[in-house]
Amino acid sequence: MNDNTGDALTLDTASGVPIYRQIVDWVRVRVAGGGLEAGQQLPTVRQMAVDLHVNYNTVARAYQELERTGIVNTMQGKGTFVASQPVPVDEVVRATKLRHLVNEFLAKAAEFGFTPAEVLSETALRVPESGPRRER
């Protein structure tokens, strides 16, 4: 899928991030950055599935998530449109950055033979129950 900024959606099947999540993230970032404007129509679920060579249900799940979070509105028989409420850029950028950092971290840990369960267990030991620790 292309938008008016020329940033095509490319899927990374090796990233460990589910395809529907990559679609959601792409739309959120484009909306936040102005590449998709309020009222702009997205491709139909079927068309996006064909364009991306993915299952119809995968795109449908992404659109449902986008609608649930208020990023898009679906009008029966008319299509799916970017909602008029803007997505805060900071929120999208932070969430996307964190997702990328976690993916990189898990990939590096896997190179050394650690499972996600081992990483989670070790990480849990370092996170205080009452919230983030502040250095003094």
Image: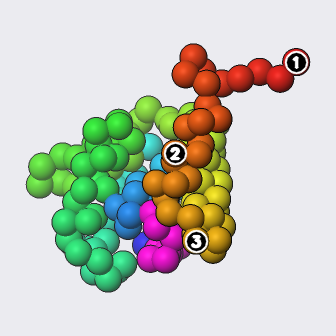
The amino acid type, in three-letter code, at marker 1 is Arg
- Could you tell me if the residues under marks 3 and 2 are in contact, i.e. CB atoms within 8 Å? no
Reading the image, the residue beneath label 2 is: 121
Determine which of the numbered discs, if any, sits on residue 77 in the image: none
* Disc on the earlier residue, 3 or 2: 3
Quarter occupied by the N terminus: bottom left
* Disc on the earlier residue, 1 or 3: 3
Where are the magenta residues, as a range?
A: 6-17
* Above or below, 8 relative to 109: below
* Disc on the earlier residue, 1 or 2: 2
Helix, strand or loop under label 3: loop
Viewer-nearest of discs 1 and 3: 3
The amino acid type, in three-letter code, at marker 2 is Ser
Task: Count up the numbered dots.
Answer: 3
Viewer-nearest of discs 1 and 2: 2
CA separation in Å, label 3 and label 2: 15 Å
CA separation in Å, label 1 and label 3: 34 Å
Instruction: Specify the principal SS of the magenta part.
Output: loop
> Is residue 133 highlighted in magenta?
no
